[in-house]
Image (cartoon, helix red, strand yellow):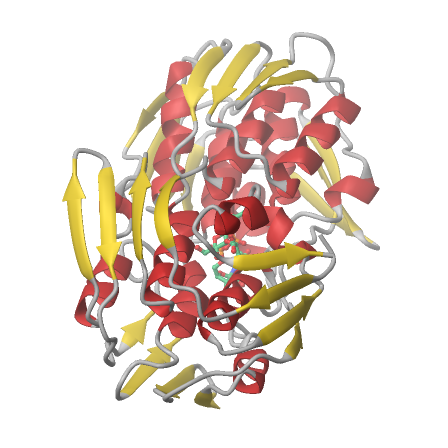
Amino acid sequence: METLTILGGQPLRGTLAVQGSKNAVLPILAAAAAIPGRFALTNFPPIRDGIVTRELLEGLGVRTFLRGDCLRLDSTGPVGSAPDPKLAGRLRSSVLFLGALLARNGKAAIPLPGGCVLGARPLDLHLTALEALGVCVRCEPGRLVCAGRPRGGTVLLRYPSVGATENLMLAALGAAGPVCILGAAREPEIRDLADFLTACGARIRGAGTACLRIEPAPLHGAAHRVLPDRMEAATWLCAAAATGGSLTLTGLRPDHLRPVLKTLSRAGCRITEQSGRLTLCAGPLRAAGPVVTGPYPAFPTDAQAPVMAALLRAAGSTVFEETVFEARFRHVPALRALGADIETAGQLARVRGVKSLHGARIAATDLRGAAAMVIAALAAEGETTLSQAWHLDRGYGDFVERLQSLGAEVHSA
Ligand code: EPZ
């Protein structure tokens, strides 16, 4: 999808089933390369990052077969140690193949990962921790080469990095002894990876806490249903809030989204939950800040841009503080082009509600920034053209069709 045209002004109304989580399925796919076995992943999301990772696995020798939302994988044959640089260079999550292939083969070579540009996105936490487990890490021009089966031990993360925690969990699968990760990330996606690995025979304690321990164990294939995508859910809820609509989501885990639900309720939305279904009815919106992002269970950084877009016409001012990434306000210029009143200073942004927004020609910058631009355009009067819309394909499956099912006038060119 290159360009989207959006005619704003329609309140979104309807029901959507939340898809499988991008940020849960990507480490699980890497884990399938680490463990010789046959796997069945249901609730597999139809997103570009998943498709690219599937191609990357095929290139390593893992056979895959997709039917509906079930992806079957067979990694019982030999698996390579160097993913295709053209594919791996497009994803941030390709860095997880370091841990996975170290566990499988005792060596790995990956290109420096791609993904959304949200700042420097260094890898020091991953590499320092792997070295602490005795892995030899060599940085070559444009790629990382690791060798040596990790030994057991305790590693301390100075920041609860999601990717570094996942990488260490995967490397620990092939370690010579128990690995303890202190300062581990606590996101629901970490727990989903731990649930998958446990189904494969791994002995894991403390998933979802800051102290995660993995003991060596014989590993095998497994079946797993991928966690629902809390960020996709947040995106749809923000779109309904921004357009004064009402939306029911099924198949989500509201407990994984509390800070976002609290902010939208404070802003004037009526949110009800009933046995796995959540309904939001938008009211006249009011300021709901301050919104401060942070590692789970704090307000998730991936929801910062969509919630900002939802509050562009809310009465009053809302302050956002982005503490996770140093450059995660890249969507602000496009929101201003749509008529938003946003002031930024370093990691702070202040949104003053305006009476109305208007269509404009804008360009997407990253996955969640692009979602924010669509949300604002849906609330604007007139037509918006969004170029570089391919960012959305990375993390949202059937994006246009799902919006159209809610009554949005959105078309991809
Ligand atoms: C994961 O990225 C997610 N991506 C991101 O979602 C999410 O925003 C992020 O976690 C935070 O929740 C996937 O799961 C594929 P981090 P990751 O390592 O693992 C710094 C989306 O929109 N850091 O927790 O890359 C880093 O620069 C994407 O779905 C180091 O300094 O995030 C950042 O400031 C965007 N050194 C902070 O830690 C390192 O070695 C958090 O990064 C690693 C990270």
The answer to whether residue 296 is seen in the rendering is yes
Please report the residue visible at 51 percent of the width from the left and 14 percent of the height from the top.
40
- In the image, is 339 to the left or to the right of 253? right
Who is closer to the viewer here, 398 or 38?
398
- In the image, is 210 to the left or to the right of 401? left
Can you give x and y, in whole percent of width and height, for residue 212 in the image?
33, 37
The answer to whether residue 184 is seen in the rendering is no
User: From the viewer's perspective, is residue 225 above or below residue 253?
Assistant: above
Can you give x and y, in whole percent of width and height, for residue 359 in the image?
57, 79
Can you give x and y, in whole percent of width and height, for residue 124 in the image?
58, 57
User: From the viewer's perspective, is residue 338 above or below residue 300?
Assistant: below
Please report the residue visible at 55 percent of the width from the left and 26 percent of the height from the top.
31
User: From the viewer's perspective, is residue 123 above or below residue 405?
Assistant: below
Total labels: the figure holds: 0
Please report the residue visible at 43 percent of the width from the left and 29 percent of the height from the top.
226
User: From the viewer's perspective, is residue 375 above or below residue 146?
Assistant: below
The part of the image, by quadrant, that contains residue 198 is: top left
Who is closer to the viewer here, 257 or 138?
257
- In the image, is 191 to the left or to the right of 333? left
Who is closer to the viewer here, 262 or 62?
262
- In which quadrant will I find the C terminus? bottom right
Please report the residue visible at 45 percent of the width from the left and 49 percent of the height from the top.
162
Can you give x and y, in whole percent of width and height, for residue 216 in the image?
44, 18
